[in-house]
Amino acid sequence: MSIITLTTDLGTKDSYLASLKASILSEIEEARIIDISNEIEPYNILQASIVLKNCFKDFPLNTIHIVAVDDEISIEHDHIAVYANGHYFIGSDNGIFPLVLDDFKAEKIVSLNISQKTDNLTFASKDVFSIAACHIARGGTMEIIGKPLLDFNTKKNILLPVIENNIIRGVVTYIDNYGNAITNIKKEVFINNIKDKEFNILFGRENDGIIKISNKYKDVVLAEKLALFNSNNFLQISINQGKASSLLGLKFFDVIRIEF
C-alpha cells in the first residue's frame, strides 16, 4: 500500500485536517498517512513548494503527495494529478508543481474529473484529492480519473538569483522553525561564480557581512552569525543557537547579495 503524504494550510486547530484524514481512511482503512506539514501559511504556494521539494525525494517510490494549499477549483486553476520522478502529486494547477518539480520533467499529467460526493466546492482536499489518492493507492491508473494534459497550465514561477557586475542577488524564500533564513541561491551557482574569489554576503542594513561558508553551526562561536549550504544545497543564513530571522531582522523575500 502506497504512502499518502499531506502538505496543507489546514492547520491543526480546526476539524478540517481530521476530516481529510477520515476521508482517506474511509476509503482505505489501512492507509499510511504521513504529515509533511499542515502549518503552511494560508495560500502560500511558495512556502508549500519549498517544504515539499525539500523532502519528497526521501520517501519511497510511488508515494502519493496531496498538496492542499490554495486548492479551490477555478477557471484559471484546474485540479490535477502528476507523475514525476517516481512519485505522484495531487493538487491545484496554481503554480505549485512547477516550483516543486523544477528539477524533474513530469512524465504524466491529468486534469481530474472526479465526481464529488457533496456539492461543497471549497474543500477539494477532502472531496477530490483524497479520492484521487486512494484510487492511485489501490493501483488505479491516472487516466481513469483524469484527462491527459501535455503540460502545466500555469507558467513556471521559479525564483532564480540574479547575477551581474560581480554580485549574486537572491532572496529569502523560507524561514524554518529555528529561524534560519533559507535563500534561493544554490551551491552550484555560488561555486560557479565565486570560484576562488573573496566574497562578502550582505543583507538588510548589515555593513559587516559574512566572508566565509561554514560546514556546521558550531564552526562559529555561540550567538555568532554564519552562512552554510543546507541539506538541499541552498545558501542559508543562521546564528549558532539563535534565530537569525529575528536577531538579524531577516524576513520572507528580503534580498541577500553576495559581492565578489
Image (tube, helix red, strand yellow):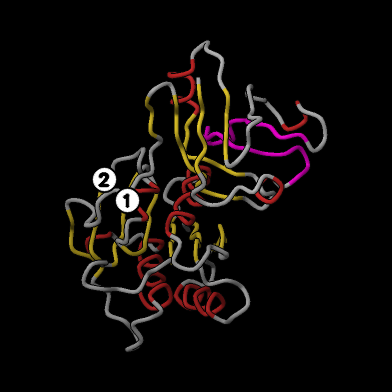
Range covered by the magenta-colored residues: 224-242
Rendering quarter of residue 78: bottom left
Residue visible at 35% across and 68% down in the picture? 132
Percent from the top left, x then y, of residue 199? 56, 20
Toward the right, the furthest residue is 222
Q: Earlier in the sequence, mark 1 or mark 2?
A: 1
Residue at the bottom extreme of this rendering: 119
The residue depicted at 36 percent of the width and 63 percent of the height is: 91
* Amino acid at the residue labelled 2: Glu
Could you tell me if the residues under marks 1 and 2 are in contact, i.e. CB atoms within 8 Å?
A: yes
| Residue at the disc numbered 1 | 83
Q: Amino acid at mark 1?
A: Tyr
Mark 2 neighbour class, 10 Å CA radius: few under 14, some 14 to 19, many 20 or more = few
Q: Looking at the rendering, which quadrant does residue 166 occupy? A: top left
Query: What element does badge 1 sit on?
Result: strand
Q: Residue at x 38, y 75 (%)?
A: 124
Percent position (x, y) of residue 85? Answer: 37, 42
* Classed neighbour count for the residue bearing mark 1: other residues with Cα under 10 Å, few (<14), some (14–19), many (≥20): some
Q: Which numbered dot is residue 107? A: 2
Seen in the picture, residue 147 relative to 226 is either above or below; the reply is below
Relative horizontal placement of residue 4, taking residue 210 as reference (left or right): left
Res. 136 image quadrant: bottom left
